[in-house]
Amino acid sequence: MRRDTRCIHAGSHPDPSTGAIMTPIYQTSTYVQEAPGVHQGFEYARSQNPTRQALEEAYALLEQGRYGLAFSSGVAATDAVLRLLAPGDEVVCGNDMYGGTYRLFTKVHERFGIHFRFADMRSIDTLAAALTDKTRLIWVETPTNPLMSITDIAAVAKLGHSHGALVVVDNTFASPYLQNPLTLGADIVMHSATKYLGGHSDVIQGALMMNDAGLRDRLYFIQKSCGAVPGPMDCFLVLRGIKTLHVRMQRHCENGKAVAHWLRRHPRIAHVYWPGFEDHPNHNIAQTQMRDFGGMISFELQDPDTDAATRVLSSTHVFALAESLGGVESLINHPATMTHASIPREERIRNGLHDGLIRLSVGIEDIQDLIEDLAQAIG
Ligand SMILES: *Cc1c(COP(=O)(O)O)cnc(C)c1O
Protein backbone atom coordinates (compact mmCIF):
# COMPACT_ATOMS: atom_id res chain seq x y z
CA MET A 1 0.00 0.00 0.00
CA ARG A 2 1.26 3.49 -0.85
CA ARG A 3 1.32 6.34 1.66
CA ASP A 4 -1.99 8.04 0.75
CA THR A 5 -3.90 4.75 0.62
CA ARG A 6 -2.38 3.79 3.97
CA CYS A 7 -3.88 6.91 5.64
CA ILE A 8 -7.36 5.71 4.65
CA HIS A 9 -7.01 1.97 5.21
CA ALA A 10 -4.47 1.63 8.06
CA GLY A 11 -5.97 -0.34 10.95
CA SER A 12 -9.39 -0.61 9.26
CA HIS A 13 -10.98 -4.04 9.04
CA PRO A 14 -14.73 -4.64 8.72
CA ASP A 15 -16.10 -5.40 12.19
CA PRO A 16 -16.16 -9.21 12.55
CA SER A 17 -19.55 -9.30 14.29
CA THR A 18 -21.55 -7.07 11.87
CA GLY A 19 -19.39 -6.15 8.89
CA ALA A 20 -19.51 -2.44 9.89
CA ILE A 21 -16.93 -0.72 7.67
CA MET A 22 -15.94 1.73 10.43
CA THR A 23 -14.36 0.35 13.59
CA PRO A 24 -17.07 0.60 16.26
CA ILE A 25 -16.58 2.54 19.50
CA TYR A 26 -16.26 -0.38 21.91
CA GLN A 27 -17.53 1.50 24.97
CA THR A 28 -16.94 -1.27 27.49
CA SER A 29 -14.75 -1.74 30.56
CA THR A 30 -14.62 -5.55 30.53
CA TYR A 31 -15.31 -8.69 28.45
CA VAL A 32 -17.23 -11.83 29.38
CA GLN A 33 -15.07 -14.94 29.59
CA GLU A 34 -16.31 -18.36 28.50
CA ALA A 35 -14.50 -20.08 31.38
CA PRO A 36 -11.88 -18.67 33.77
CA GLY A 37 -8.99 -17.51 31.58
CA VAL A 38 -10.77 -18.53 28.34
CA HIS A 39 -11.44 -15.38 26.28
CA GLN A 40 -10.99 -13.81 22.85
CA GLY A 41 -7.85 -11.87 23.76
CA PHE A 42 -9.76 -9.12 25.59
CA GLU A 43 -9.85 -9.21 29.41
CA TYR A 44 -10.13 -5.67 30.77
CA ALA A 45 -10.23 -2.43 28.78
CA ARG A 46 -7.19 -0.78 30.39
CA SER A 47 -5.17 -3.64 28.86
CA GLN A 48 -7.06 -4.22 25.59
CA ASN A 49 -9.80 -2.45 23.64
CA PRO A 50 -10.69 -3.23 19.99
CA THR A 51 -11.11 0.44 18.99
CA ARG A 52 -7.73 1.28 20.50
CA GLN A 53 -6.18 -1.79 18.90
CA ALA A 54 -7.33 -0.65 15.43
CA LEU A 55 -5.81 2.77 16.08
CA GLU A 56 -2.54 1.31 17.36
CA GLU A 57 -2.25 -0.74 14.18
CA ALA A 58 -2.82 2.45 12.15
CA TYR A 59 -0.16 4.29 14.20
CA ALA A 60 2.44 1.61 13.42
CA LEU A 61 1.66 1.63 9.69
CA LEU A 62 1.72 5.44 9.42
CA GLU A 63 5.24 5.60 10.88
CA GLN A 64 6.36 2.54 8.90
CA GLY A 65 7.04 0.79 12.19
CA ARG A 66 5.99 -2.58 13.57
CA TYR A 67 4.19 -1.47 16.75
CA GLY A 68 2.03 1.42 17.95
CA LEU A 69 0.72 2.32 21.40
CA ALA A 70 -1.93 4.94 22.21
CA PHE A 71 -1.89 7.13 25.33
CA SER A 72 -4.35 9.56 26.90
CA SER A 73 -2.21 12.55 25.84
CA GLY A 74 1.10 13.42 24.21
CA VAL A 75 2.68 14.13 27.59
CA ALA A 76 1.41 10.75 28.91
CA ALA A 77 3.22 9.09 25.97
CA THR A 78 6.39 11.06 26.82
CA ASP A 79 6.02 10.13 30.50
CA ALA A 80 5.79 6.42 29.55
CA VAL A 81 9.10 6.68 27.64
CA LEU A 82 10.79 8.31 30.65
CA ARG A 83 9.62 5.40 32.83
CA LEU A 84 12.02 3.14 30.91
CA LEU A 85 14.81 4.88 32.87
CA ALA A 86 16.15 4.47 36.42
CA PRO A 87 17.53 6.97 38.96
CA GLY A 88 21.01 8.13 37.97
CA ASP A 89 20.33 7.86 34.23
CA GLU A 90 20.85 10.91 32.06
CA VAL A 91 18.81 12.27 29.17
CA VAL A 92 20.15 14.68 26.59
CA CYS A 93 17.52 16.90 24.98
CA GLY A 94 17.28 20.03 22.85
CA ASN A 95 17.26 23.51 24.37
CA ASP A 96 14.26 24.52 22.24
CA MET A 97 11.29 22.23 22.74
CA TYR A 98 7.63 22.00 23.65
CA GLY A 99 7.10 23.71 27.02
CA GLY A 100 5.09 20.81 28.47
CA THR A 101 7.92 18.35 27.71
CA TYR A 102 10.39 20.69 29.45
CA ARG A 103 8.07 20.92 32.47
CA LEU A 104 7.60 17.12 32.66
CA PHE A 105 11.36 16.57 32.47
CA THR A 106 12.51 19.23 34.93
CA LYS A 107 9.61 19.41 37.40
CA VAL A 108 8.52 15.76 37.56
CA HIS A 109 11.21 13.32 36.46
CA GLU A 110 14.20 15.29 37.77
CA ARG A 111 12.78 14.69 41.28
CA PHE A 112 13.03 10.94 40.71
CA GLY A 113 16.76 11.15 40.03
CA ILE A 114 16.78 11.39 36.23
CA HIS A 115 19.19 14.09 35.08
CA PHE A 116 18.53 16.22 31.98
CA ARG A 117 21.21 17.92 29.90
CA PHE A 118 20.18 20.51 27.34
CA ALA A 119 22.12 20.92 24.11
CA ASP A 120 21.81 22.86 20.87
CA MET A 121 20.78 19.98 18.66
CA ARG A 122 21.18 21.89 15.42
CA SER A 123 24.79 20.74 15.58
CA ILE A 124 25.87 17.13 16.11
CA ASP A 125 29.11 18.35 17.73
CA THR A 126 27.36 20.23 20.56
CA LEU A 127 25.11 17.23 21.07
CA ALA A 128 28.10 14.86 21.20
CA ALA A 129 29.76 17.10 23.82
CA ALA A 130 26.71 16.71 26.11
CA LEU A 131 26.81 12.89 26.13
CA THR A 132 28.30 11.12 29.17
CA ASP A 133 28.67 7.47 30.13
CA LYS A 134 25.34 7.85 31.96
CA THR A 135 23.39 8.99 28.89
CA ARG A 136 20.61 6.46 28.27
CA LEU A 137 18.26 8.47 26.11
CA ILE A 138 18.40 11.29 23.55
CA TRP A 139 15.17 13.24 23.12
CA VAL A 140 14.87 14.96 19.74
CA GLU A 141 12.21 17.38 18.57
CA THR A 142 12.43 18.37 14.88
CA PRO A 143 11.19 20.79 13.68
CA THR A 144 11.28 22.36 17.14
CA ASN A 145 8.47 24.20 18.82
CA PRO A 146 8.47 27.18 18.33
CA LEU A 147 11.75 28.12 16.61
CA MET A 148 11.49 25.57 13.79
CA SER A 149 15.08 24.36 14.22
CA ILE A 150 16.03 21.16 12.42
CA THR A 151 18.04 18.25 13.83
CA ASP A 152 19.64 15.57 11.64
CA ILE A 153 17.76 12.46 12.84
CA ALA A 154 19.98 9.89 11.07
CA ALA A 155 23.15 11.47 12.51
CA VAL A 156 21.70 11.56 16.06
CA ALA A 157 20.57 7.91 15.76
CA LYS A 158 24.08 6.87 14.73
CA LEU A 159 25.72 8.86 17.52
CA GLY A 160 23.19 7.72 20.15
CA HIS A 161 23.53 4.06 19.26
CA SER A 162 27.32 4.22 19.42
CA HIS A 163 26.82 5.38 23.05
CA GLY A 164 24.18 2.73 23.81
CA ALA A 165 21.46 5.39 24.19
CA LEU A 166 17.88 5.16 22.92
CA VAL A 167 16.95 7.82 20.39
CA VAL A 168 13.40 9.17 20.64
CA VAL A 169 11.88 11.69 18.22
CA ASP A 170 8.87 13.90 18.97
CA ASN A 171 7.46 13.96 15.43
CA THR A 172 4.38 16.06 16.23
CA PHE A 173 5.24 19.09 14.06
CA ALA A 174 6.03 17.12 10.92
CA SER A 175 3.32 14.43 11.30
CA PRO A 176 3.94 10.94 9.90
CA TYR A 177 2.98 12.28 6.50
CA LEU A 178 6.08 14.48 6.23
CA GLN A 179 8.72 12.61 8.23
CA ASN A 180 9.29 9.02 9.45
CA PRO A 181 12.08 8.93 12.07
CA LEU A 182 12.02 5.12 12.48
CA THR A 183 13.18 4.77 8.86
CA LEU A 184 16.10 7.11 9.74
CA GLY A 185 17.22 4.94 12.67
CA ALA A 186 15.27 6.34 15.65
CA ASP A 187 14.14 3.79 18.26
CA ILE A 188 10.85 5.41 19.29
CA VAL A 189 8.62 8.03 17.68
CA MET A 190 6.31 10.07 19.89
CA HIS A 191 3.31 12.10 18.69
CA SER A 192 0.87 14.44 20.28
CA ALA A 193 -2.04 12.99 18.27
CA THR A 194 -3.99 15.99 19.56
CA LYS A 195 -2.38 17.90 16.68
CA TYR A 196 -2.16 16.77 13.01
CA LEU A 197 -3.16 13.11 13.54
CA GLY A 198 -6.51 14.04 15.13
CA GLY A 199 -6.51 17.15 12.97
CA HIS A 200 -9.80 18.70 14.10
CA SER A 201 -9.02 20.18 17.56
CA ASP A 202 -11.52 17.87 19.23
CA VAL A 203 -9.41 15.31 21.09
CA ILE A 204 -6.34 14.99 23.38
CA GLN A 205 -4.21 11.94 22.67
CA GLY A 206 -0.62 10.67 22.40
CA ALA A 207 1.14 7.91 20.46
CA LEU A 208 4.36 5.90 20.51
CA MET A 209 5.65 3.88 17.56
CA MET A 210 8.63 1.49 17.52
CA ASN A 211 10.16 -1.54 15.74
CA ASP A 212 11.81 -3.49 18.55
CA ALA A 213 9.55 -6.15 20.12
CA GLY A 214 11.34 -5.99 23.49
CA LEU A 215 10.90 -2.22 23.65
CA ARG A 216 7.25 -2.58 22.66
CA ASP A 217 6.70 -5.10 25.50
CA ARG A 218 8.31 -2.80 28.07
CA LEU A 219 6.23 0.17 26.90
CA TYR A 220 3.02 -1.90 26.76
CA PHE A 221 3.73 -3.00 30.35
CA ILE A 222 4.08 0.68 31.37
CA GLN A 223 0.91 1.60 29.41
CA LYS A 224 -1.23 -0.96 31.25
CA SER A 225 0.50 -0.63 34.63
CA CYS A 226 0.40 3.18 34.80
CA GLY A 227 -2.93 3.33 32.99
CA ALA A 228 -2.72 6.50 30.87
CA VAL A 229 -4.86 4.96 28.11
CA PRO A 230 -7.25 6.86 25.84
CA GLY A 231 -10.97 6.03 25.81
CA PRO A 232 -12.57 4.33 22.80
CA MET A 233 -14.44 7.46 21.66
CA ASP A 234 -11.14 9.38 21.46
CA CYS A 235 -9.55 6.49 19.54
CA PHE A 236 -12.45 6.60 17.06
CA LEU A 237 -11.97 10.35 16.54
CA VAL A 238 -8.25 9.93 15.80
CA LEU A 239 -8.97 6.99 13.45
CA ARG A 240 -11.37 9.24 11.57
CA GLY A 241 -8.89 12.12 11.53
CA ILE A 242 -6.13 9.94 10.07
CA LYS A 243 -8.27 9.11 7.01
CA THR A 244 -7.72 12.64 5.70
CA LEU A 245 -4.18 13.20 7.02
CA HIS A 246 -2.63 13.18 3.53
CA VAL A 247 -5.02 15.71 1.97
CA ARG A 248 -4.93 17.96 5.01
CA MET A 249 -1.12 17.91 5.14
CA GLN A 250 -0.82 18.75 1.44
CA ARG A 251 -2.98 21.84 1.99
CA HIS A 252 -1.21 22.78 5.28
CA CYS A 253 2.09 22.70 3.34
CA GLU A 254 0.73 24.72 0.41
CA ASN A 255 -0.82 27.40 2.66
CA GLY A 256 2.21 27.38 4.99
CA LYS A 257 4.56 28.07 2.11
CA ALA A 258 2.43 30.96 0.83
CA VAL A 259 2.14 32.54 4.31
CA ALA A 260 5.88 32.12 5.04
CA HIS A 261 6.89 33.87 1.81
CA TRP A 262 4.30 36.62 2.28
CA LEU A 263 5.48 37.30 5.86
CA ARG A 264 9.08 37.42 4.74
CA ARG A 265 8.35 40.21 2.23
CA HIS A 266 6.43 42.28 4.81
CA PRO A 267 8.31 45.44 5.88
CA ARG A 268 7.17 45.23 9.53
CA ILE A 269 8.59 41.73 9.99
CA ALA A 270 12.14 41.17 11.16
CA HIS A 271 12.46 37.41 10.95
CA VAL A 272 10.45 34.40 9.79
CA TYR A 273 11.23 30.90 11.08
CA TRP A 274 10.25 28.22 8.54
CA PRO A 275 12.45 25.32 7.40
CA GLY A 276 11.38 25.65 3.76
CA PHE A 277 13.51 28.78 3.19
CA GLU A 278 16.73 28.00 1.36
CA ASP A 279 18.70 30.10 3.86
CA HIS A 280 17.21 28.34 6.92
CA PRO A 281 20.33 27.07 8.77
CA ASN A 282 19.51 23.36 8.31
CA HIS A 283 17.38 23.62 5.18
CA ASN A 284 19.33 20.88 3.39
CA ILE A 285 18.76 18.44 6.28
CA ALA A 286 15.05 19.33 6.33
CA GLN A 287 14.94 18.70 2.60
CA THR A 288 16.53 15.27 3.03
CA GLN A 289 14.49 14.00 5.96
CA MET A 290 11.11 15.70 5.34
CA ARG A 291 8.82 15.39 2.31
CA ASP A 292 7.64 19.00 2.63
CA PHE A 293 7.87 21.77 5.22
CA GLY A 294 4.47 21.89 6.92
CA GLY A 295 2.22 24.66 8.14
CA MET A 296 3.99 25.78 11.32
CA ILE A 297 5.65 29.20 11.12
CA SER A 298 7.01 31.62 13.73
CA PHE A 299 7.94 35.26 13.20
CA GLU A 300 9.22 38.37 14.96
CA LEU A 301 8.08 41.92 14.31
CA GLN A 302 10.62 44.74 13.70
CA ASP A 303 9.25 46.28 16.89
CA PRO A 304 10.37 43.67 19.44
CA ASP A 305 8.22 44.57 22.47
CA THR A 306 5.34 42.49 23.80
CA ASP A 307 2.80 45.29 23.18
CA ALA A 308 3.35 45.27 19.42
CA ALA A 309 2.97 41.49 19.37
CA THR A 310 -0.15 41.73 21.55
CA ARG A 311 -1.74 44.17 19.08
CA VAL A 312 -1.25 41.67 16.24
CA LEU A 313 -2.39 38.73 18.38
CA SER A 314 -5.60 40.55 19.33
CA SER A 315 -6.48 41.75 15.82
CA THR A 316 -6.86 38.60 13.73
CA HIS A 317 -10.33 37.34 12.82
CA VAL A 318 -9.66 34.12 10.87
CA PHE A 319 -6.61 33.08 12.92
CA ALA A 320 -7.97 32.25 16.40
CA LEU A 321 -5.84 33.16 19.43
CA ALA A 322 -5.31 29.77 21.07
CA GLU A 323 -2.73 27.21 22.17
CA SER A 324 -2.39 23.98 20.18
CA LEU A 325 -1.83 23.43 16.46
CA GLY A 326 -2.42 21.02 13.61
CA GLY A 327 -6.19 21.45 13.27
CA VAL A 328 -7.97 22.42 10.06
CA GLU A 329 -8.50 25.96 11.39
CA SER A 330 -5.68 28.49 11.63
CA LEU A 331 -4.40 29.46 15.08
CA ILE A 332 -2.15 32.25 16.32
CA ASN A 333 -0.21 31.93 19.57
CA HIS A 334 2.18 33.89 21.78
CA PRO A 335 4.71 31.29 23.04
CA ALA A 336 6.19 33.54 25.78
CA THR A 337 2.87 33.85 27.63
CA MET A 338 1.01 30.78 26.36
CA THR A 339 2.59 27.46 25.23
CA HIS A 340 6.06 28.17 26.65
CA ALA A 341 5.18 30.12 29.81
CA SER A 342 6.47 27.18 31.90
CA ILE A 343 10.06 27.87 30.76
CA PRO A 344 11.82 30.53 32.91
CA ARG A 345 12.08 33.84 30.96
CA GLU A 346 15.86 34.10 31.21
CA GLU A 347 16.32 30.59 29.86
CA ARG A 348 13.77 31.18 27.11
CA ILE A 349 15.55 34.31 25.92
CA ARG A 350 18.96 32.67 26.10
CA ASN A 351 17.63 30.03 23.70
CA GLY A 352 16.29 32.62 21.26
CA LEU A 353 12.61 32.60 22.25
CA HIS A 354 11.89 36.33 22.63
CA ASP A 355 8.83 38.06 24.08
CA GLY A 356 7.77 39.33 20.65
CA LEU A 357 7.75 35.93 18.93
CA ILE A 358 4.44 34.93 17.32
CA ARG A 359 3.67 31.38 16.21
CA LEU A 360 1.15 30.40 13.53
CA SER A 361 -0.48 27.07 12.87
CA VAL A 362 -1.59 27.66 9.29
CA GLY A 363 -4.85 25.84 8.63
CA ILE A 364 -6.48 24.70 5.42
CA GLU A 365 -8.80 27.68 4.77
CA ASP A 366 -8.67 29.72 1.54
CA ILE A 367 -5.18 31.22 1.37
CA GLN A 368 -6.51 34.69 0.37
CA ASP A 369 -8.56 34.89 3.57
CA LEU A 370 -5.51 33.94 5.64
CA ILE A 371 -3.24 36.52 4.03
CA GLU A 372 -5.87 39.30 4.17
CA ASP A 373 -6.37 38.54 7.86
CA LEU A 374 -2.64 38.75 8.62
CA ALA A 375 -2.32 41.89 6.47
CA GLN A 376 -4.98 43.80 8.43
CA ALA A 377 -3.61 42.57 11.79
CA ILE A 378 0.05 43.38 11.13
CA GLY A 379 -0.84 46.69 9.46
C1 LIG B 1 1.21 19.43 22.11
C2 LIG B 1 2.56 18.87 22.06
C3 LIG B 1 2.97 17.90 22.98
C4 LIG B 1 2.10 17.43 24.13
O1 LIG B 1 0.97 16.74 23.70
P1 LIG B 1 -0.46 16.77 24.46
O2 LIG B 1 -1.31 15.94 23.57
O3 LIG B 1 -0.88 18.19 24.56
O4 LIG B 1 -0.25 16.14 25.81
C5 LIG B 1 4.25 17.39 22.85
N1 LIG B 1 5.08 17.80 21.88
C6 LIG B 1 4.73 18.73 20.97
C7 LIG B 1 5.69 19.15 19.91
C8 LIG B 1 3.46 19.31 21.03
O5 LIG B 1 3.12 20.26 20.15
Image (cartoon, grey):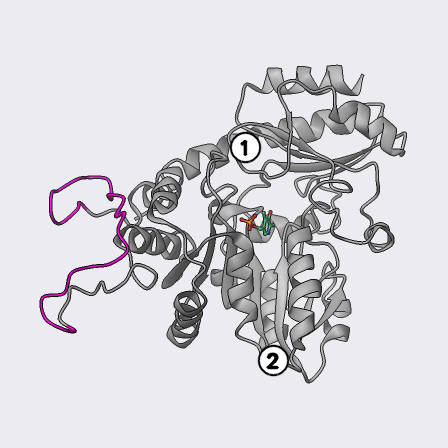
Please state which of the two labelled residues, at mark 2 or mark 1, is closer to the viewer: 1
* Res. 252 mark: 1
Q: In which quarter of the image is residue 104?
A: bottom right
Nearest to the observer: residue 283 or residue 210: 210
Q: Residue at x 28, y 44 (%)?
A: 9
Nearest to the observer: residue 226 or residue 298: 226
What's the CA distance linking mark 2 and mark 1? 37 Å
Q: Quadrant of residue 275?
A: top right
* Helix, strand or loop: magenta stretch: loop
Query: In the rendered structure, does residue 36 fall within the stretch colored magenta?
Result: yes
Q: In this view, does 273 lie above or below 138?
A: above
Badge 2 crowding class, 10 Å Cα cut-off, few under 14, some 14 to 19, many 20 or more, is few
Which amino acid does the dot numbered 1 rest on?
His
Q: In this view, does 282 lie to the left or right of 181?
A: right
Disc 2: which residue: 162
Q: Can residue 185 be seen in this view?
A: no
- The spot of residue 119 in percent (x, y) is 76, 65
Q: In this view, does 38 lie above or below 306?
A: below
Q: Residue at x 50, y 35 (%)?
A: 201
Query: In the rendered structure, does residue 178 fall within the stretch colored magenta?
Result: no
